[in-house]
Every structure is written in structure tokens, then in C-alpha cells.
Amino acid sequence: MSQSGATLACGGNSYLVDDLADANLVLMECSNGNEVINGGVRTDRTIKELAQLIEEVVGFNGKYSSDSSPAWAAWSWMRRKKAAAKSERRNRSRFLEKVE
């Protein structure tokens, strides 16, 4: 495999994969489904850099914007927290239905 692929960490080992199909094969061979899987391309990209790359690849000529203000971060955090609480309540009620 070329050295330009992505690194996939699974089961305490690291694998170099060239594409998603290779990554899936590695996961099927090494994962038991209970551990954390981490994949990356050995370089970090900001959201803006990723947006610019997608813009270039797909030929997007429009405008996009982002909001990194503290108010947005707080709102986003609260939204995730509320969604997690709702999911927890739903799972708890399903569990109680099965027990009864």
C-alpha cells in the first residue's frame, strides 16, 4: 500500500489503508464491536479547510458561513445535552416496558 493512505487504529494495532473498503475489511477482521475505533489521515484539518476542499472538489461557487461565537457553542452544547436526556428517558421507558 502507498504511504498516502489513512491510518486506522483497531484492537491496539495501527493499519495503513488506502480507502474505505480497505478500512472496512480491517475492521471486520480486528474488531469485536466493543472497542473504540479511530481512523484518520495523519493530518488535521479545520472545518474551514474541509469546507474549502469540498468547495474545490464539487465546484461549489456559492457562499457559506460559520458561527464560532461563545453563544453558539453554548446553544449547541445545551441542544446536545437535551437530546441525550430525551434519549435516556426514552431508553429507560423501553426498558421498563420490557421488564413489566
Image (cartoon, grey):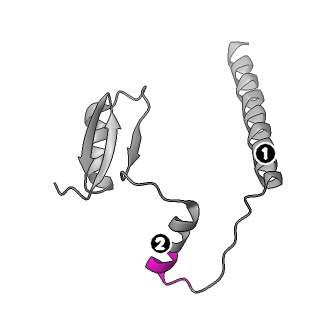
User: Gap in Å between the C-alphas at discs 2 and 1?
Assistant: 28 Å
The number of numbered badges drawn on the structure is 2
Q: Nearer the viewer, mark 2 or mark 1?
A: 2
> Residue 57: percent from the left, percent from the top?
44, 77
**Figure check: 97 above or below 78:** above
Q: Foreground: 26 or 41?
A: 41
Q: Residue 67's quadrant in the figure?
A: bottom right
Q: Which residues are magenta?
A: 54-60
> Residue 47: percent from the left, percent from the top?
57, 61
Residue ID for mark 1: 79
Give the quadrant of the C terminus.
top right
Circle 2: element type: helix
Q: Foreground: 23 or 4?
A: 4
User: In this rendering, would 61 be left or right of 69?
Assistant: left
Residue at the limit of the structure toward the bottom, as seen here: 61
User: In this rendering, would 63 be left or right of 19?
Assistant: right
Residue at the limit of the structure toward the left, as seen here: 1
Residue ID for mark 2: 53
Q: Are marks 2 and 1 in contact (CB under 8 Å)?
A: no
